[in-house]
Amino acid sequence: MKTEKPIKKIIKAGLFALLLTASANYSQAQEASDKEPSYSLLNAHSHNDYENDIPFQRAFQKGFGSIEADIFPINNELLVAHSKEHVNPSVTLYSTYIKPAIAALQKDPKRKLHLLIDIKENYPSALAILIKQLEPHKDLLKTSTHPGQLTITISGSRPKPNDYKNYPDYIYFDGEWPLQHTPEESKHVELVSFPFTAYSKWNGKGRLEHADYTRVKGLIDSVHAEGKKIRFWATPDTKSSWLALMNLHVDLIGTDAVESLGNFIKDLAKNIYINKEIHKTYQPTYQSDGKNGKIKNVILLIGDGMGLTQIYSAFTANQGQLNLFKMRNIGVSVTNAADTYITDSAAGGTAMAGGQKTNNRAIGVDSTEKPLKSLAVYAAEEGKKTAVISVGDLADATPAAFYAHQPDRSMEPQIAQDMHASGINMFLGSGISNFKKTLNGTTAVELLEKKGYTVTYTFEDFKKSNADKLVGLVPDNETRPKIEGRGEFLTEAFLKATQQLAKDPKGLFMMLEGAQIDYGGHRNNVSQVITENLDFDKVIGKALEFADSNGETLIVVTADHETGGLTLLDGDIQSGYVLGEFSTNDHTAVPVPVFAYGPHSDDFRGVYANTEIFKRLLKYIKK
């Protein structure tokens, strides 16, 4: 089955607006419509709104631009109900919809609303009552010569087109199809409605089949060619369906799930990413990959919060290219903490750095708070040069797990003061305030300097220094998200570390963290997640290149946990477009992938606890 192409680009207009294409990815491609409507909550239509537990207000307060009510004229009143046996004399169109709508629109002159009134019987009587109720408020109503704030459209039982002229110009109609109206009659037609089931039996899962797509798209194009809006009723009420209707340029997206559609449209701007800067990937030689050769250098790259979905979103955005996907030895890490099903970065980082499961929030200690020696410290004791680098706070959980020993990650000044005793050669990250706080009469910076460390306070000064014991405490803006203008911090940091430390005959150990992937997940920001993954992938490419240059480097790339419960709803590898949604703003228990390259990289195949990463790396650090 072939499917239509996804949404291509996103723009802002007012709060959020979505520019959608409607081209089809069939063997005989459909031509994209010239009309590219922007989608916002104004396009959201509350179908059978009166069946909500809070009619009108629930949809209106959510920002919906269109609301539907079915009515019966009874005893000189318009009663709202789906069927006559369910009418309630207290639920009237005026009290439930017109009165609160008028009041709300008068308070907010910028707000607009479309009220679709489906008359179930006796339209002459119903329209007479409706006009009487609307007449005092006609200054707020849309006409052909007045934009107005409230548009009234009559559907269901309604007059023939040649009688439209007998009604006020603020009364619009749901047009009969095909439109066989005179120009004067056409002025009274606001939209045309169709039952979706007459054109497709699609259940809203997957994508429309070619024949259905062609049939529905042809109908939509023909309505738009008449200059009219279109809506469907009896559509599947799913996210896939809403996306399909947007791709097809349907003007009103109907739903019975007000909150779900409202949130879906509201969040489209931050949930869509289209990559404009495709980075080229490195082609590994694989000459030492999986071989039983010597390991001189160990490089552990941790994408904080990076699950398989985050990785695949980056692969899609980079148009089907990732350095990470060129690593052939792959495993799965189970990340639970000692005391909880879902780990945090402290316990996850400690498991990889120190080799034991520990409690959430614990830094470099086991579940009894006994200090654990980290891979970096073991490497330093073996005479290797060592580096801990993060594009985030150096006293935060993941980097801290490689040098500190504290019962709680919130003890950041204490964590910072542990750094001087680690024996690690090089540190780089932000969070300078933690290192300048006085604790027990001194600061972490003072302790570091007494231990012989050179402390720099800008990234440029860090890169210029050749000190054997070097700490770069950069301003927070130098580790800001990529979407906020951060440069090539991680790549340049990696190159600095390898160029300076790899000269040592015993080699190096490096832990480098892509911290901002996690930050993007916590913020439920698809753009941040993807751009941080792409930036991290550039480092992976440099690491692969470095490994091939010497044949004695083992690279392991993994995550401490997944963040956000990211789901990919749509995407297009050719254009680098991704649409994702999050299930949480916290970590999840989903196991994370492990990628390895270089000698003995096949040791990292299989499914295992995150503590195994420590054990398998330590075996080669201590050789």
Image (cartoon, grey):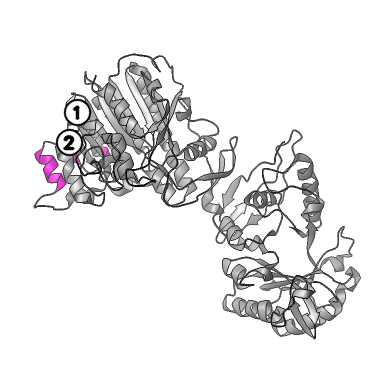
Q: Amino acid at mark 1?
A: Ala
Q: Which residues are magenta?
A: 439-460
- Which disc number belongs to residue 513? none
Is 417 or 50 nearer to us in this picture? 50
Horizontally, residue 400 falls left or right of residue 315, namely left
Instruction: Tell me how far mark 2 sits from mark 1, CA to CA.
Output: 9 Å
- Quadrant in which the N terminus appears: top right
Nearer to me, 33 or 327: 327
Residue 493 appears in the figure: no
Q: How many marks?
A: 2
Residue at the image position 53 percent from the left and 45 percent from the top: 567
At x 74%, y 37%, the residue is 29
Report which quarter residue 192 is drawn in.
Answer: bottom right
Amino acid type, residue under disc 2 in the picture? Ser
**Which residue corresponds to mark 1?**
380
Of the image marks 2 and 1, the number of the one nearer the N terminus: 1
Is 523 part of what is drawn in magenta?
no
From this view, report whether residue 147 is shown above or below residue 274.
below
Q: Residues within 10 Å of mark 1 (few under 14, many from 20)?
A: many
Q: Nearer the viewer, residue 440 or 162?
A: 440
Q: Is residue 446 magenta?
A: yes
**Residue at label 2?**
422
Relative to 237, 513 lies left or right: left
Could you tell me which residue is drawn at 30 percent across and 30 percent down? 614
Describe the element under mark 2 as helix, strand or loop.
loop
Indicate the quadrant containing the C terminus: top left, top right, bottom left or bottom right: top left
Q: Are marks 2 and 1 in contact (CB under 8 Å)?
A: yes
Which SS class for mark 1? helix
Instruction: Determine the image quadrant of residue 232.
Output: bottom right
